[in-house]
Image (spheres, helix red, strand yellow):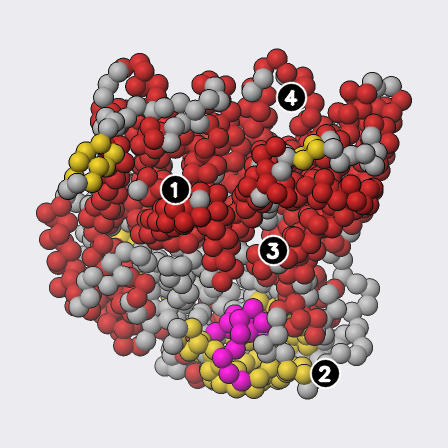
Amino acid sequence: MSDPALRIGDVAVDAGEIVALLGGNGAGKTTLIETILGFHAGQVSLFGRDVSALPVEQRVLLGVGYVPERRRVFAGLTVLENLEAASALPAVDRRRRVEEMLVLFPMLGERPEARAWLLSGGQQQMLALARALMNRPRLLLMDEPTLGLAPLVVSDLLSRLATMAEEGMAILLSEQRASLALGIAHRGLVLSRGKVVRTGTARELADDPALADLMAGG
Amino acid sequence: MAYALIALGFVLALNAAGAVNFAHGDLVVLGGAVAVLAGLWTGLPGPLLLPIVALVLGATGILAARIAIQPLAARPPEATFVATIALAAIIEQGLTVGLGAAPLTAPPFAGSGTIDIGGLALGRQPLAILAVGAVLVAAVWFLLERTQLGRRMRAVSSDRYMARAVGIPVGRYVMLSLALAGALAGVAGFLLGHQFLVAPTQGAGHMLKAYIAVAIGGWGSVPGALLGALGIGLFETFVSAAVGDAWASAALYVAVLAVLVLRPQGLFGEPVGRRA
Amino acid sequence: MRPLGWFWTVVLVLPPLLALLVLPSFGQRMVTLVGIYALMGVGYQLVFGQLGALNLAQGALFGLGAYALALLAPAAGLLALPLAAIVAAATAALVCGPLLRLQSHYFALATLALAALVNLVAVHVADLTGGANGLAGFTAALPTGAALLSLVWACLIVAVVLYARLFRGSLGHQARLLREAPLAAATLGIDGGRWRFAAFVAGAALAGLAGGFSATLSGVVSPDVTSFPIMILCLTSVVLGGSRHPMGAVLGAVIAVCLPEMLRDLQGLWLLAYAAATLVVVRWAPEGLAGLIDRWRGATAAATPLPMLPDSLALSGGPRELVLESVSKSFGGVAALSDVSFTVDRGEVVGLIGPNGSGKTTLLNVIGGLESADGGTIRLDGQRIDGLSPHRIARAGIGRTFQTVPLADETRRGDIVRAITSGAPFLLLDEPAAGASDRERRDIARLVDQVSAAGRGVLIVDHDIDLLTRVCDRLVCLDRGRVIAAGRPAEVRADPRVRATFLGLDEAAA
């Protein structure tokens, strides 16, 4: 019963929990997330099952949503097409799920036929999140989601994540801006040169005066 | 219209494999040759030969990419250029050795002779080319724009990494695009092969025209390639009516050079990738 | 690259000697043909091998040389040979000047269109070219037999030796940089445009000369000499032989001429075998036959030597300060830099920090000329450098390194050392410590110390705040394109806005 949603090395994330992955540039946050997805080899288990041998696309279908750094929406596709392309469901369910997403993200519902590259950075981030949610994941991986976003969009995004976690989603959130991530996370990990150098509850980390130096790779 | 099919296949392969396929023109010729042989062996009428040609060339399209494009994905683009040029020479020489250098006539698609429409006597074959071409282009457009399969194909050519990360089996979709590209080339070869015959040396010309269509239409843009191909067709028809075939081609090449110098992103190209 | 060495010198000189001494006239003719193709191939190596540009007009230029000779020889005699080279070179210079800026696939298309055009003219301007029948009867005043063979091979030997010498040293390194890392090349002051132009025109001259020789040898010229198969032959033989090796073109030409003779019974099959062999070489032995032979001889080229730090880092002369005033830049309406002003003096190390996307790399690109500023000025002493092309800015005194090492087998330190040895009084270092180990970091810090002690100015971007604190005299912190703090490292690190935006700590948490 108590299998975590994700386990890779020392890192584990349980259902309903937000774990902040902290570290400076080049600390290995993206590499860790890509290893979980299967872009790099490594021992990974998802939902209590060893998936080390599964290719990326099959791991994703087990219930993993991924929002990459810099969003990477499908530029030439419309908002609707971005969402539909990400779905593995039959047509009727797929459309119903798209409708749900447009209700959940009113910002997207306003311009469903717009090509994704014409959206603003904040809209693209919401589209990337909605796309990641299309297959009803139980684990969400977010890589630097607040990068380049206006403060208002950031707070909207973070409160959505908090709500999703309350509904049972496991979330791994990588951030360079520790204060933001620790504001909503339950636990935090500090990564430096590919290794976990510090773990603790969000509270402990936020109160740690050495955190800045640790994150800067000192 | 046949140019449109060739250019459409060219751009699909370009998007799927991320590389120029210099052998694409020779796939067109191969399509004509397969139509000739299949017609001889089976004696089937044109419309039934069509799926045979499409299937054989679809498989060839995949094979070609497996040999000359995919193993070189990590190398500079020049490596793929050279490999596909070599592949083109292999197909051309293989056809010359196998069938001889003399042009062959592909079986007609819709019989020969003319149809009288409103007092105009129109050749059955050109009409058939027009009809089949239009139907296929429309079908491909429908596939890409209106079906889940097409959406996913476009997602794959837009961002392969991200396509995998949302659960799309990318390898299968790339193969599908390449097969479609080969099949379109083959059908074009079949349709052209009755009127303009099938000769091994035609490949370079077909490839050049598809290349030009894609370059002036905007690199990697499907509608741009179609517009480019139609533009080339119209340009050739009207200019050659005025000054003859040879000078029409010459004018086309001069126009291409001018376009490349003045608008390096193509006539209809939109600035891609400028957004941070 | 590599010196020719005794082995290859013998291989190069042997065929003409053997042909002159022992072979019958048919054999001499073949050896002459090898020389002609090899000459065209060496020219092709300049553009395709060294610069990596897929030029598909080389065959057409060869044909142009052939026609030029056929038309000029009755009047000019032997002088028609150099004239053939000049005609081809002039055509290349005229037509392809503007095309050289094009991206690889557009460049290929443009040269392909040019080739098709030349072929059309050859076939259809019958008054000048004799149309499909071609031209004949122009060889009266031209050398034949052994004399022609000697002439061809003399030209070839000179070309190969010159090529080997030229690309052995720094020119070879420059070509590699241009091929694999054009941006880095520009920041070292290499003028890519002029380089490509020179290579293209020189290559065309060799193709024209080879075409002239080929017309001399055969005595007739027909549109076939401008056709695509000649181009394919040139391309495949250079790839087979080795697209950069000094002997690649020669070996390729030997195969191109001898294979069809050996496989004469198979008729069309030889071309098939030839194309298949090319495919195999591209896939499994990209260095070509010459490279394979070198490997088998155990003479694998000495790897490009790592750049060495010069004995003395001191520089005298050159500008004293780099001054930025109100520099602004926006992408599609979004401000990437706004109103950025600061100064870097010689002997000073300034660190540039800020969160991702705050404009640090954009600023380096603007200073180095890779992007143009929308407003403000950048000066070296009194001289404005904003708006200059990257290689001019580099020559004015600014060197730089990149976030990712531009050449595959180079170390980060090598990249920095190269920027230092370029002799620039000011260096821009983009994240030199990203992904570096502790030891490399110490090494980099020491290097930066030495450079500034020797009187150069350094602007360094990095996220390693400790490293910067150690080496920098001053720090400048950017956030969303604006300078939010500047001053001594301790001051900047203590600044509350810097702590919040860059170090990721709220005042409350600290």
Confirm or deny contact between disc 2 and disc 1 (CB under 8 A). Answer: no
Q: Position of residue C473 (x, y in %)?
A: 63, 80
Instruction: Determine which quarter of the picture holds residue C439.
Output: bottom right
Are the residues under marks 2 and 3 on the same chain?
Answer: yes
Q: Which residue is mark 2?
A: C320
Marks 3 & 1, CB-CB < 8 Å contact: no
What is the three-letter code of the residue carrying label 2?
A: Arg
Residue position marked by numbered label 4 in the rendering = C260
**Residue B90 belongs to the span the image colors magenta:** no
Disc 3 from disc 1: Cα separation: 28 Å
Q: Is residue C156 visible?
A: yes
The reply to whether label 3 and label 4 mark residues of one chain is yes
Q: CA distance from mark 1 to mark 4?
A: 33 Å
Q: Position of residue C407 (x, y in %)?
A: 62, 53
Q: How far is mark 2 from mark 1, CA to CA?
A: 56 Å
Three-letter amino acid code at disc 3? Val
Mark 2 vs mark 4, CA separation in Å: 66 Å
Q: Amino acid at mark 4?
A: Pro
How many discs mark residues in the rendered view? 4
Say which of A200 and C138 sits in front.
C138
State the residue position of label 1.
B10
Tell me the SS state at disc 1: helix
Identify the mark nearer the N-term, 2 or 3. 3
Residue C372 magenta: yes
Chain containing mark 3? C
Spatial CA distance of label 2 from label 3 is 43 Å
Residue at (87% x, 19% y) in the render: C22
Query: What residue is pinned by disc 3?
Result: C95
